[in-house]
Amino acid sequence: MSESAEQVIRSQGLTRRFGSLVAVDHVDLEVPKASVYGFLGPNGSGKTTTIRMLCGLLEPSEGKAQVLGLEVPKEAEGLRRRVGYMTQRFSLFEDLSVFENLDFLGEIHSLKASHRRSRIDTLLERYRLADRRKQRAGTLSGGQKQRLALAAAVLHEPELLFLDEPTSAVDPENRRDFWESIFQLADEGTTVLCSTHYMEEAERCHLLAILDHGKLVANGTPQQLMDDVDATVVEIQTEDPRRVREQLAGMTGLLSLAQLGNRLRLLLHREVENPVWQVEEELDIDAGATVQVVRPNLEDVFVVVTRDEVS
């Protein structure tokens, strides 16, 4: 993304408290136009609360935000016609047909009848629902419901689309197809802010913010975050991962150790010199292990930037 790109979202010190709980803690954001901007974090990290404040649905306890040039929540009414919002739960009318759901929403958005029907026909074709137009929404499959929800969110051609964990209930094939639709929207000029807890989804985004316990702990392109991770990643191939784990448990400089089948993935402090040699020194000479330094992935980044909270 170009550094000179227009910023669709700007926030400074955005904070939300619920009693003594700080759900979002002084978050600063800049989201460029026509980008796919990801929020990565576990449940309870503040992703949904942040989105609700940026939509104008929830008032910040502190800080400020400007969305599409409007101050939120003060100018939220003017914002609602210019944004779309898709939640992780299917929120359309299950007893209405696919067409009836979209037609009803078109009326809510004050779309003229001729334009409304033309727009619905276009979206039904784009999202492969034309043959389901008379089917009740409640009888659709998970992937079909997801595509219908996306059609509903973009029916009024919003400039900015908020997606709150939109693929949490669909299979990998439908998830992949969904992301193709998201990039098509971005190519057409729509800005997309999408929250997720899937690492492989986060890696698709143009830009990514990692949230943990309400704080923004890292942001940048996925590649930048992986290149700049403050750790060395070492992988061990072994036929006895349990034994190797026990031998490495007390190693100096060890941040994290995870098992992947017969592989072990270690995160070591950057200060550890000659990491392969150091790991091999910890192992029995007959451990039968192959040790090598490998490239970090986003899961490594997440573990490192949240390591104060990871046990």
Image (cartoon, grey):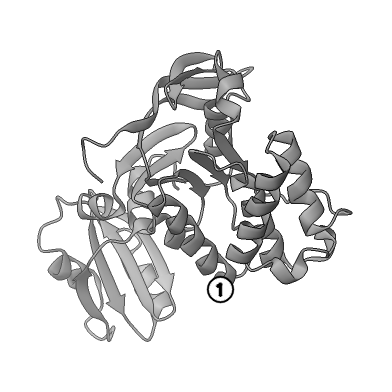
Q: Is residue 5 left or right of residue 139?
A: left
At x 42%, y 70%, the residue is 259
Q: Position of residue 81 (x, y in %)?
A: 59, 30
Q: Nearer the viewer, residue 68 or 72?
A: 68
- Considering only vertical position in the picture, is 232 above or below 62? below
Query: Amino acid type of disc 1?
Result: Glu
Residue that mark 1 sits on: 173
Residue 290 drawn above or below residue 303: below
Q: Nearer the viewer, residue 295 or 208?
A: 208
> Residue at the spot x=62%, y=23% of the render?
58
Q: Is residue 200 left or right of residue 53?
A: left
At a point 23% along the width and 50% down the height, the residue shown is 224
Q: Circle 1: is it few (<14), some (14-19), or many (20+) Cα within 10 Å?
A: few
Looking at the image, which is closer to me, 5 or 124? 124
In the image, taking residue 27 as reference, residue 121 lies left or right, namely right
In the image, is 66 to the left or to the right of 84?
A: left
Quarter-wise, where is residue 265 in the image? bottom left
Name, please, the residue furthest toward the right. Answer: 95
Whole-percent x and y of residue 214? 49, 32
Q: Position of residue 305 (x, y in %)?
A: 34, 44
Residue 91 appears in the rendering: no
Q: Which quadrant of the figure has residue 156?
A: top right
Rendered residue at 51%/27% (across/down): 24
Q: Position of residue 279 (x, y in %)?
A: 21, 68
The quadrant in which residue 12 appears is top left
Residue 104 shows in this picture? yes
